[in-house]
Amino acid sequence: MSWFIIVAVIILVMAAVVAVGLLKKPAARTKEHPYRRIDALFTPAERSFFGVLNQAVGNSAAVFGKVRVADVIAPEKGMPRGDWQRAFNRISSKHFDFLLCDKENLSVLCAIELNDASHSSEKRKRRDEFLSGVCEAAGVPLIQLAAKAAYSVSEIQSLLSPHVPFDAARGKVAIEPKKSMKTCPKCSSEMVVRVAKKGKYAGKHFWACSTYPKCKYIEAANA
């Protein structure tokens, strides 16, 4: 019986030693830099619009994407420090989808917001209303554009024309609409740029007839 007690005591002591060791074992450390790379700067919808926007702007302006509002607009000078900081905080985490700047001095010409279905929520409506007020106060033209499957180059140029110097006296005209517009060889309608949504060409741009599905003519974007 005494040997049984001795063995039991030894087992208990060993179990206690193991338990203490486990308690003293340091917890797994969190990574010092817990970050990952995002696959692309733009969403598929933004990438599609970006291609058409570059065509519409041509050499008339520099196009930037995902620009922080606070890099373009700042609270007024002379405000009390607390008020200034609160005003700055309200714009510091917001960004413009696209920003057009003068190619020579990079002064801001206008900002563009591409509004998808998420902008119909009350929270996004309040955000959009606030941003519109900020831009109006700062004198930054803001173009709100609904996201859609296809865009017309001429339509985008028309929206930008009050702000982008297409006819600026810089030695040459940046865009020549008659030459830049593509016409469908089957029905003579205007062609628009689309982005393949699936298949082996997913994410690739291509030209398609603006009257689709009435006319289903397409061709490669680099054709």
Image (tube, grey):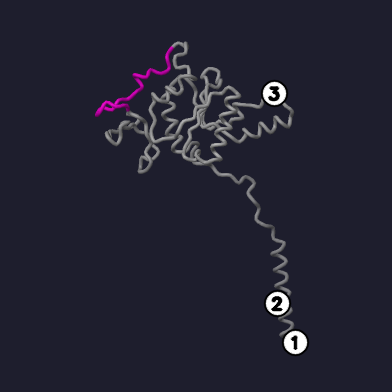
Mark 3 is on which residue type? Lys
Residue 4, horizontal then vertical, whole percent: 71, 85
Residue 215, horizontal then vertical, whole percent: 27, 33
The structure residue drawn at horizontal position 42% and vertical position 14%, both measured from the top left corner, is 173
Q: Secondary structure at mark 1?
A: helix
Distance between the alpha carbons at the discs numbered 2 and 3: 75 Å
Q: Quadrant of the C terminus?
A: top left
Distance between the alpha carbons at the discs numbered 1 and 2: 14 Å
Query: Residue 9's image quarter?
Result: bottom right
| Mark carried by residue 11 | 2
Relative to 29, residue 12 above or below? below
Residue 130, horizontal then vertical, whole percent: 58, 32
- What residue range appears in magenta? 172-190
Q: Which is nearer the eye, 101 or 40? A: 101
Q: Earlier in the sequence, mark 1 or mark 2?
A: 1
Query: Residue 52's image quarter?
Result: top left
Relative to 59, residue 223 above or below? below
Q: 190 left or right of 144? A: left
Q: Quadrant of the N terminus?
A: bottom right
Q: Which residue is mark 3?
A: 77
Mark 2 is on which residue type? Ile
Q: Secondary structure at mark 3?
A: loop
Q: Which is nearer the eye, 183 or 148? A: 148
Mark 1 is on which residue type? Ser
The structure residue drawn at horizontal position 28% and vertical position 28%, both measured from the top left corner, is 184
Contact between marks 3 and 1 (CB within 8 A): the answer is no
Q: 115 left or right of 4? A: left
Instruction: Choose mark 3 or mark 1, whichever is in front.
Output: 3
Q: Which residue is mark 1?
A: 2
